[in-house]
Image (spheres, rainbow, N blue to C red):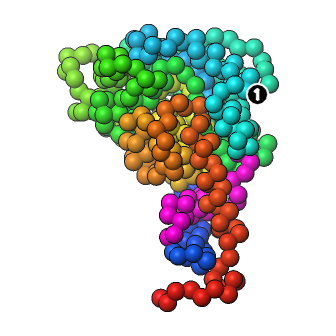
């Protein structure tokens, strides 16, 4: 079996006994039942994922920022030059990005992974060079990746998750960097949910109306040429479609109803960092270590991971809901409730980092708060 196949096979759904025990324990704590709202469900979710109640404290945390470039940048979907990807990698490594500040605040380590930056990077502390390609092909003209490249990127993410857990991480946080990656994210969300490109495509780094309209059309064209368009995105019926390669690959059919496998769908319209983040999520789930998802890039990658291994969502926590409209669609499809909504649209792992203290607090309640019996507090009458 390949690393990807072994990882998918190792993922188990939330343990029903641990879920039931965690819910019962929540009800015995010295507080009104349900008084902690969504935090109670977070603690229960982590118990089910770990198959033990109370679940382990999700500390220390490790952020992995997967960086890659995108061929679709040539379609004018963003005003930012492609070299900003490389420049921001340098900023992460120098400790100067928002993600670095937030990671320092919560005590998370930061690992930067070059999975597909268009330029070659020199070795540096905190940098993992696992380049699969120098960026993707233009997804609006055909498949962004071969399935072999998608598998290589997935397995890079799996390896990073394993390494961080081996080094002591007990919570993984997704991060990303890639100019034009919200275009690929929108295409993935359309492909895996069947939603209209106009609904899920957002302004990314803050594009104007003209650029947004171009971006929506680029997403629709990508879906058409890669045979992933559904009724919602079927614009020009005479547009020629290009089918990705049909080699034998793991993963069931895409939920968009195209007939393509999940892996082929990811390869057709995803980015190298999307594939690596999907692998990172799969790797954490296989090890029963919780994964806090960041924004729309992570949400779209999680859709791909869930299409490969449906039980993976049981091991994820939605850190926040970003300002990108497709993120809400992705989270709804995954059945995840975001912990924070601050209109963030930065990426890098920032929303996931901000949510980490809330996840820790939810679990700490399970470990430290007394029950009615142990505290000698009278419970309410049944």
Indicate the position of residue 104 as horizontal and vertical percent values.
73, 38
Indicate the position of residue 299 as horizontal and vertical percent values.
48, 39
Residue 297 appearing in the image: yes
Indicate the position of residue 91 as horizontal and vertical percent values.
68, 21
The residue drawn where x is 53% and y is 30% is 346
The reply to whether the magenta stretch includes residue 259 is: no
Residue 357 lies, with reference to residue 95, above or below; the image says below
Quarter containing the N terminus: top right
Residue matched to label 1: 126
Residue 257 lies, with reference to residue 93, above or below; the image says below
The residue drawn where x is 70% and y is 60% is 56
Residue 332 lies, with reference to residue 151, above or below; the image says below
Q: Nearer the viewer, residue 125 or 130?
A: 125
> Label 1: few (<14), some or many (≥20) within 10 Å?
some
- The image quadrant of residue 125 is top right
- The image quadrant of residue 371 is bottom right
Q: Nearer the viewer, residue 205 or 118?
A: 205
Residue 306 appearing in the image: no
Residues in magenta, as a range: 34-62
Query: In the picture provided, is 61 more to the left or to the right than 34?
Result: right
The residue drawn where x is 68% and y is 11% is 120
Indicate the position of residue 229 as horizontal and vertical percent values.
29, 28
Query: In the picture provided, is 157 more to the left or to the right than 40?
Result: right
The reply to whether the magenta stretch includes residue 40 is: yes
């Amino acid at each position: 079996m390949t690393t990807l196949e072994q990882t998918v096979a190792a993922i188990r759904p939330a343990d029903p006994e641990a879920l039931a025990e965690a819910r019962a324990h929540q009800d015995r704590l010295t507080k009104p039942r349900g008084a902690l709202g969504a935090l109670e469900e977070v603690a229960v979710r982590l118990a089910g994922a770990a198959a033990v109640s109370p679940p382990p404290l999700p500390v220390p945390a490790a952020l992995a920022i997967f960086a890659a470039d995108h061929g679709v940048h040539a379609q004018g979907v963003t005003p930012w030059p492609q070299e900003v990807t490389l420049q921001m990698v340098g900023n992460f490594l120098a400790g100067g990005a928002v993600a670095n500040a937030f990671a320092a605040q919560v005590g998370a380590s930061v690992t930067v992974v070059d999975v597909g930056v268009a330029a070659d990077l020199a070795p540096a502390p905190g940098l993992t060079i696992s380049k699969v390609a120098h960026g993707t092909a233009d997804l609006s003209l055909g498949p962004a990746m071969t399935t072999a490249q998608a598998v290589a990127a997935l397995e890079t993410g799996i390896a990073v998750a394993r390494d961080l857990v081996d080094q002591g991480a007990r919570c993984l946080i997704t991060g990303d960097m890639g100019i034009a990656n919200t275009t690929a994210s929108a295409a993935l969300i359309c492909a895996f949910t069947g939603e209209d490109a106009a609904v899920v495509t957002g302004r990314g780094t803050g594009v104007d109306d003209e650029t947004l309209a171009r971006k929506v059309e680029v997403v629709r064209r990508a879906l058409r040429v890669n045979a992933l368009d559904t009724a919602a995105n079927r614009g020009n019926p005479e547009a020629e479609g290009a089918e990705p390669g049909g080699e034998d690959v793991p993963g069931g059919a895409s939920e968009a109803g195209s007939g393509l496998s999940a892996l082929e769908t990811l390869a057709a319209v995803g980015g190298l960092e999307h594939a690596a983040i999907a692998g990172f999520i799969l790797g954490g789930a296989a090890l029963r270590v919780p994964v806090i998802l960041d924004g729309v890039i992570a949400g779209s990658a999680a859709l791909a991971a869930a299409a490969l291994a449906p039980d993976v969502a049981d091991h994820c926590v939605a850190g926040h809901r970003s300002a990108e409209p497709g993120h809400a669609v992705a989270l709804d499809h995954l059945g995840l409730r975001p912990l924070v909504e601050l209109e963030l649209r930065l990426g890098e792992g920032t929303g996931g980092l901000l949510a980490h203290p809330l996840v820790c607090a939810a679990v700490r309640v399970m470990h430290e708060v007394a029950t009615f019996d142990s505290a000698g507090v009278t419970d309410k009458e049944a």
